[in-house]
Image (cartoon, helix red, strand yellow):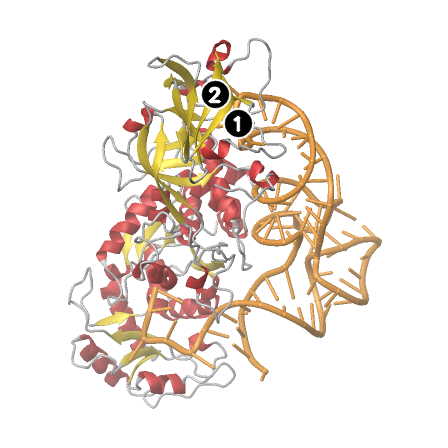
Amino acid sequence: MTDNTEISAEARPLDFIRQIIAEDLRSGKHQQSVTRFPPEPNGFLHIGHAKSICLNFGIGLENNSPCHLRFDDTNPSKEESAYVESIKKDVHWLGFDWGRNLFYASDYFDRLYDYAIQLIKLGRAYVCELSAEEMRSYRGTLTEAGKESPYRDRPLEENLDLFKRMKEGEFAEGSRVLRARIDMGSPNLNMRDPVIYRILKVAHHRTGDAWCIYPMYDYTHCISDALEGITHSLCTLEFEDHRPLYDWFLDTLQTACHPRQIEFARLNLTYTVMSKRKILQLVQGGYVNGWDDPRMLTISGLRRRGYPASAIRKFCTDIGIGKKESWIDMSVLENAARDDLNETAPRVMAVLNPLKVIIDNYPPGECEELEAQNHPQRPEMGSRTVPFSRELYIERDDFREDPPKKFFRLGPEREVRLRYGYFIRCVSVVKDTTTGEITAIHCTYDPETKGGGSPDGRKVKGTIHWVSAPHAISCPVRVYDRLFLSENPDADKEVDFKEHLNPNSLTSLDCCLLEPSLAKAQAGEQFQFERNGYFCTDLIDSQPGAPVFNRTVTLKDSWIKTDTTGYTS
RNA sequence: UGGGGGAUGGUCUAAUGGUAAGACAGCGGACUCUGACUCCGCUUAUCGAGGUUCGAGCCCUCGUCCCCCAGCCA
């Protein structure tokens, strides 16, 4: 990667996980670190996954050490290869590369099975015939110990035989499971003889119908880590209780490698929901247009919205890694996008809500090309020309018939600068006689101020953007806003989170007028529409020569806070 | 009334017994051919009570509050 994500990560103090790894490297406990990102292919990746990806792959990059991509595909009833492909695409897009280290838990099904046999032979696993409901009642509660299964002490040979027959498909789904034989009295529920294999007569997206028994997460994950030589197995806080079990399996099986599991807090963002289940509801309920709807904080949604991968990485390093449950303000994410795009996005002019301007003293039919900077702070990005003529459009918000205090823009008898153009002064207003709506304004221009200069030193307070009426192109622009109105749509358990959906999270504008250079914008290109925000061409709906734009994020706007007249666009 | 975790400004994160720091947000100002960017300034924090220590956010004790766990999901 070419950005400075890693450099800034190095400049800041190490988080507690990186400290542990640094110490393990320093002490010689490990020669190198090996981390992994272990998604289950049952959905699309979202910004929460990005935190884990940036952590695991980031550590790999910083230490010049491997980070594996491993699909935790042990539940074929929920998993699909389409998800595998989208996850790979998203991890790559985020800027990370697993190289040759692409793995699947399903690669280990044979070895996992052998380990299970070993566990049985050790007397540490047994086939249990309790139904799911019975098992639940035998498990006990948070405050009462569980009860041992009547099948717990069956002879070793019988377990071996039964387990083999489970594998061979002799038994019905749900009729038997293989359980670890640990401690039904443990205060940690995970240790009360957890299920390690269940019968699932479902085809697997990679192993087909080779198996009808599938291993459970707790059993699979630690062994997969050990088989891959993972040194530090990073996961979220809710797995803290599972660590004793993680260690138990590896200790009992005496694996050569015993990774250290370390837990960190998952990401919570204000004004959104993060759980796969809720994201799915939004998609399936038609509240958004698919997983990659630009309002979604899925990786594909963010990509389509115009968030650069580098901005997402910056965000992930900004928020840090800790163990306390935290809520990151959405503005932190938005700011990461602004920061990034401010450096890279070329500036253009686009009028979202047009108001016609006629320059009375400009010759009809005449047109001139004016030079405009592509990025005022970065001259190396060059310049372009924009056509100027007698009829223009400006932003409706940039004219007020009765301007409030501190309004720097156009009003009757006021003068403003047209960006890279001329100073203009408003001389009259045309209104619709029935509705009273302003339909056009008449102005005069000062030919001496061409290009926006002011040879007589005259000051204007406002500079506004514009497009030439005969030259402007019309493109659909979608203005996106936060999906939810509530900081935490989930907070009140009595109220469905969908009640907090922002009805104005998408505004489709179809009479936007853009400077003609935008006609050749490529899909995925990013721009700053000056004074409006950052926009990108939609990856899916744009056609060659007919781009569709998405607003990624607004520019900060301190005028909105100043303007107390309640007037909004 | 079990077990496992966590509490530092509004929000995140740092300080690893020695001046509580940075980012985001907010407020004020400067600059400005983007009310953007940039720059400057400001407000605001160690959950509580004890203890150890010359010195405690950090160590000890006792509390308080919050989160997670009773899937044949991961």
> Is disc 1 in the same subunit as disc 2?
yes
Q: Residue furthest front?
A: A433
State left or right for residue A165 relative to residue A117.
Answer: left
Observer-nearest of A373 and A448: A448
Above or below, A408 relative to A216: above
Residue A454 image point, x, y percent: 55, 12
Evaluate if marks 1 and 2 touch, with contact meaning CB atoms under 8 Å apart.
Answer: yes
The residue pinned by badge 1 equals: A410
In the image, residue A487 above or below residue A469: below
**Residue at disc 1, secondary structure:** loop
Q: Residue at x 40, y 43 (%)?
A: A479
Q: Mark 2 Cα within 10 Å, few/some/many (few <14, many 20+)? A: many
Could you say where residue A388 lies in the image, as x and y percent from the top left?
38, 18
Instruction: Report, in whole angstroms, how far the alpha carbon at label 1 lies from the one at label 2.
Output: 10 Å
Residue A108, percent from left and from top = 26, 61
- Mark 2: amino acid: Cys
Q: Chain of mark 1?
A: A
- The subunit carrying tag 2 is A
Q: As rendered, which of B41 and A26 lies closer to the eye? A: B41
Quarter holding the N terminus of chain A? top left
Residues A327 and A385: in front is A385
Q: Earlier in the sequence, mark 1 or mark 2?
A: 1
Q: Nearer the viewer, mark 1 or mark 2?
A: 2
Task: Tell me the amino acid under the disc marked 1.
Answer: Leu
Q: What residue is pinned by disc 2?
A: A443
Viewer-proximal residue, A251 or A433? A433
Give percent across and percent down for residue B50.
81, 67
Residue A42 circle label: none
